[in-house]
Structures are given as C-alpha cells and as structure tokens.
Amino acid sequence: MAKLKYLGLNFLLAVILSVMPLHRAISASTDVSNQTSADEKVLRSQAEVYSKAFANGDAKTIAKMWTADGTYIDPDGVELKGQSEIEKYFASGFKQVGLIPLEISIESIKFPAANVAIEEGTCRVLRGPNSGTRTRYNVVHVKDKDQWLMANVTERDDSSVCSKESLNDFEWLIGNWSAKKPNGSMHLVAHWVGNHKFIHCQYTMMDAENEKSGEGVQVIGWSPHHQQIVSWHFSPDGGFGFGRWLRDGQYFVESTNGVEPNGTSDSSINTLHKVDDNTFTWHSTGRTAGSESIPDVPEVTVTREK
C-alpha cells in the first residue's frame, strides 16, 4: 500500500492482538493430525473484523493484526516491517483515498503446524478510484495463547489488462437490454460494427412518463496505441470521454476521463459485473468533476430483453 492506488486492495486477513516471533511458531509441534476446524473458523470470522476496521479507516486496529515485527509486502514490492510502519502506511492511505469496503475471498487455509496457518485468497475493492480491481494474497498466521495474528503478508495485483483477442469476451453483451431506474428506465442496444472490430452501444433514457429523455453512445474496441481494450463515450448533453478496460473474472472495470459540456474535466471508475448471460450490474464510483468529488451512481441491474 505504499502506492496509494492499491489502498483498498491491500488487505490481508486475520488477527487478534499478541506477539510471537515466527521462528518460535515454526519450532512448535508439526503434528497437526488433531487440528480441528475451530482455528479455521476463527481465521475466517476475523476477515469480518478486518473488513469492518478497513471500512472505518481504523489503521490502528489493522496494524495490531500483525505481530510486533510482522512484515507486509505490497503489490509494488514495497516491504513494510512492524506495526508502527504498517499503521502509518494505512493511515496515510485512508487520509488520501477515503474509506473503502472490501470483498474477501479465502481460497484455502492450511495448518503445517498446530500454531501456524498459511492462508491464500483474493480481495477486491468495491468502491473508490480502483473499484473492482483485485489482488491475490498469501499470509502466514501464528498462534500464541489461543490468539491468531499475521507474521508475514505478501500481495500482488491479480487483475489483467484486456488483450486484443479479449474483445470477444464482450460478445455476451451483444443484444438488447433494459434497466429500471427510480425516475424512469434505460434501454441499451449493443451490436458489432467495423467487421467485428468494435462494439457499438446505444443508450436510450426514458423518463417516468416513458418519454425519451436522451441518448448516449459508447464504442468499445482494441487500441493498438494503448495495447488494451478502450472505449469512447458520447453523452446526450454534449460531453464525451475515453476509457481503458481491465478484466477480473466476470468483472469488467473501466477507468474513464472526459470533458463535460462546460469544459470541466471529469473521471470515474465504471464496473460492469456479468452475473449470467442475461443479467449484469453496473455502477460508477470514484467520480470527479474538476477538483471536486461527486456522489457514486448506485448499482443498477440490467437484464436482457426477450
């Protein structure tokens, strides 16, 4: 998390409050045949403790989840050592980026010794400048006096830049879609253009009386210059913008920069989550206009029209 762009992502589990050098833990008995599920249950439940502290910007509680001399290596390879250094790192990030909720996915927890646990998994930031981006982590937990805490944490970025061929990953988007809004509805028509080199998306907004209130256009395609999938936006009010895409499983994350009709620059992080072939969700976070932050757009569920 020394690089603030990873703040929200630099999570890694598990916790409680005591101190024990790692070499003492490893020297403990390696007979784990009687290892019960109780410790795993504790480690999993502590994910919720961590998430709550992270969402509240509580750097002090987060730092105490490490051993006194615990280490953390962030996705950029920067190493932090000790609770004090880790606390400063998180506190600085929260101050600059704000409070960010996380989605935690534990893939495995193994016990090579009775008082050592190796955990692997992923975490995803759900709001903010890097909404939808995912990191993969590995953490070594140690146990002392029935309390678990982290001795070593390593994290790396796990999102991938969309390749030229991955434009085909958007093919499921082709078709007609609609979504209900509090003040009306939205209709989307997506189809291939340019010999299957681009996807043209046309958005039509309807008001509460089902009258057309505006139309927007988005074109998605491969950029040889940027070497990734990009998009161009044209809004009904005359604004326009440009976006770059990352894919993380069934999440498609677009980082945009644009210009409003009055000349003010703007930006946002738009996350499209494919739920299934006939449903996806969309929401926009980390939105700015000029130097000001503006409210997120709540998540909208979009369904395929039959």
Image (cartoon, rainbow, N blue to C red):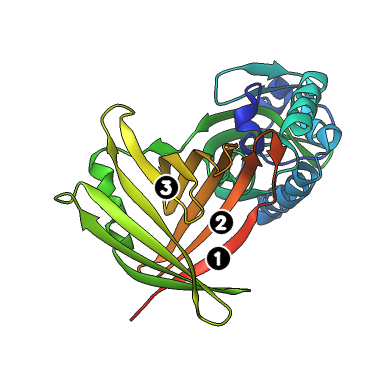
x then y, percent, for residue 233: 42, 47
Task: Give the quarter of the figure containing the C terminus.
Answer: bottom left
- Using the rendered image of the protein, determine whether residue 278 is visible from the camera's viewpoint: no
Dot placed on the residue nearer the N-terminal end, 1 or 3:
3
Q: Amino acid at mark 1?
A: Val
Q: Which mark's residue is nearer the viewer, 2 or 3?
A: 3
Would you identify the image quadrant in which residue 32 lies? Answer: top right
Q: Amino acid at mark 3?
A: His
Against 88, residue 144 (above or below) is below
x then y, percent, for residue 52: 78, 49
- 272 left or right, relative to 2: left
The residue at the point 42 percent across, 63 percent down is 203
x then y, percent, for residue 184: 56, 75
Q: Nearer the viewer, residue 154 or 194?
A: 194
Q: Which mark is residue 283?
A: 2
x then y, percent, for residue 91: 80, 28
- Label 3: how many residues lie within 10 Å, few (<14), some (14-19) or many (20+)? some
Q: Amino acid at mark 2?
A: His
Residue position marked by numbered label 3 in the rendering: 233
Q: Which mark is residue 300?
A: 1
Label 2 sits on a secondary structure element that is strand
- Label 2: how many residues lie within 10 Å, few (<14), some (14-19) or many (20+)? some
The residue at the point 37 percent across, 43 percent down is 231
Against 61, residue 276 (above or below) is below
Label 3 sits on a secondary structure element that is strand
Dot placed on the residue nearer the N-terminal end, 1 or 2:
2
- Disc 1 to disc 3, C-alpha distance: 19 Å
Q: Residue furthest left?
A: 195
Q: Which mark's residue is nearer the viewer, 1 or 3?
A: 3
Q: Are marks 1 and 2 in contact (CB under 8 Å)?
A: yes
